[in-house]
Image: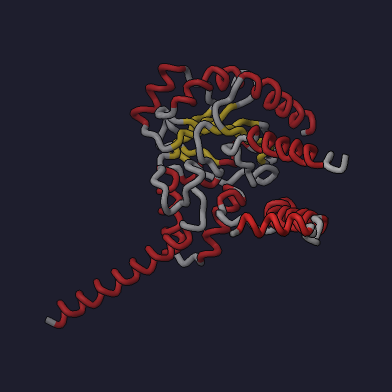
Amino acid sequence: MKKAWLPLAFIALVLLLALGLRLNPREVPSPLIGKPAPAFDLPLLHAPDKRFSHKDMLGEVWVLNVWASWCPPCLVEHPVVTQLSKTVPVVGLNYKDTREDALPWLKRNGDPFKYALFDANGRIAMDYGVYGVPETYVIDQKGVIRYKHIGPLTPEVAQKKLAPLVQELRTRG
Amino acid sequence: MARFLFLMVWLGSSFAQDADLDRRVHAVATELRCLVCQNQTLAESNAPLAIDMRNQIREQMKAGASDRDVVEFLVARYGDFVLYRPPLKASTVALWAGPFVILALGAWVLVRRLRRRPAAEPELSEAERARAAKLLE
């Protein structure tokens, strides 16, 4: 009877390890949640002479989607982003890409973006802590980052996380 | 000739500065995690993002940033995860103290077990002694 704690300790260890194995090490918690979205002033993908800044979206709940034409998972999530863009404005941040590749990509797969920004050297993406495209941010009316999703958006994440959050942020005002 | 010498000295000193900068960039990069290949440091990794981040570090150092400024810049964007040595905070206490707690527990269990063991060796009877002596002969 006095050794009853031994199997218990073993089970506790197994549970701890199982918990650790189920965590995804790729999902690095972003320190930017709850902080103002980093400032940017970038040319538009479609019109190099026009610029767009983080201030242009103030007063609206919006989604920032970081993507590239060379990124296969971006193509996978594209239908989800397209669907999402029907309910909330999505701004695309084209990451380390070329116009020659990105523009035909949008033509081929459809352009869901209210604005598509061109971040050729990825410097603005670095300010947003991007380390693996695609990444998606929800930003509120005051320009504060509320949510970040790393990796391709799935319909589940879009419906169960993003849509309710956008709704909630809108009603909160 | 004087011009040539001046040029050589100037080139030499700028190369030396570059080497210094390289060393600083490398030293900081070995303390930082590459977010793409997470078990490599920023110095080891050749992932495009790691190269961008090293270039960013170099640029900022060239502009006069201290090692600490650079590390803070990256932590603000990528979180503590980017540090190879996590800072001691409420959320990382288990990480820092855990191994020592487990070690102490193990030592405690070991000591208890050793103490419980019968200390005295069993005495041999006369007959057993004689048998042992015979076997040893």
- Report the coloring of the rendering: secondary structure
Residue B18 horizontal side relative to residue B25, left or right: left
Give the residue drawn at x 72%, y 29%: A165
Q: Position of residue A167 (x, y in %)?
A: 74, 25
Mark count: 0
Residue B101 appears in the figure: no
* A83 to A33, vertically: above or below: above
Q: Residue at coordinates 43% horizontally, 61% vertically from top-left?
A: B25
- State the residue in front, B18 or A114: B18
> Quadrant of residue B14 in the image?
bottom left
Residue B52: horizontal and vertical position, in percent?
A: 42, 48
Which residue is found at the position 67% from the left and 32% from the top? A60
Q: Is residue B40 above or below residue B14?
A: above
Residue A119 in view in this figure: yes
Rendered-image quadrant of the N terminus of chain B: bottom left
Is the residue A31 above or below the residue A114 in the image?
below
What is the x, y in percent for residue B133? Answer: 66, 59
